[in-house]
Image: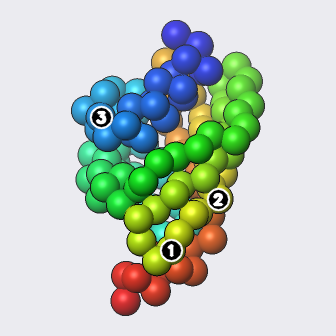
Amino acid sequence: MDTEHIVTKYHNAWTSGNMQAARLYLTDDLDFQGSIDTFRKADGFIIALTVFQKMLGRVNLIQSFFSESGAALLYDCDTMSPAGVLRTAEFFTVTDGKITSIRLVFDATELRKLMG
């Protein structure tokens, strides 16, 4: 599978709430760094992603870029919370058919307020 296929399938899985399918595209030792959390294991990341996904109304993909070993997605997360719409940039590294790292960038100000 190529990078575009892997990242697209992963994105479609998590945004539709199918975390079991999303997990299949991640290495066990996923290196995730985001605007709120960091994870070094895919299972911990999937738990946090599941919580976030439950507060989503929808995700609107705006743009995507793919290379042999990387990808970038720009999308809006329309949350059902006071945080509203979160414009999000997500950068992926893919190695041997799995996502090995994710860098997630968004303005977390309103989410941090909700977290107390």
Viewer-nearest residue: 56 or 24: 56
Amino acid type at circle 1 is: Ala
Q: Residue at x 57, y 80 (%)?
A: 109
Q: Please, is residue 23 above or below residue 76 in the view?
A: above
Residue at point 53%, 80% (across, down): 110
Front: mark 1 or 3: 1
Answer left or right for 91 relative to 79.
right
Q: Is residue 9 visible?
A: yes
Amino acid type at mark 2: Arg
Please name the amino acid that badge 3 sits on.
Asn
Helix, strand or loop status at disc 3: loop
Locate residue 111 relative to residue 13 in the image: left or right: right
Looking at the image, residue 56 sits to the left or right of residue 65; the answer is left
Find residue 2 and report its image quarter.
top right
Q: What secondary structure is marked by label 1?
A: loop
Q: Is residue 91 visible?
A: no
Residue topped by disc 2: 87
Q: Position of residue 8 (x, y in %)?
A: 54, 26
Separation (CA) of disc 3 from disc 2: 22 Å
Residue situated furthest top in the rendering: 1
| Mark 1 or mark 3, earlier in chain | 3
Q: Position of residue 6 (x, y in %)?
A: 51, 22
Q: Secondary structure at mark 2?
A: strand
Q: Which residue is mark 3?
A: 18
* Residue 83, disc: 1
Give the left or right position of residue 4, taking residue 101 as reference: right
Mark 2 closeness class: few <14, some 14–19, many ≥20 residues within 10 Å:
some
Q: Position of residue 101 (x, y in %)?
A: 53, 42
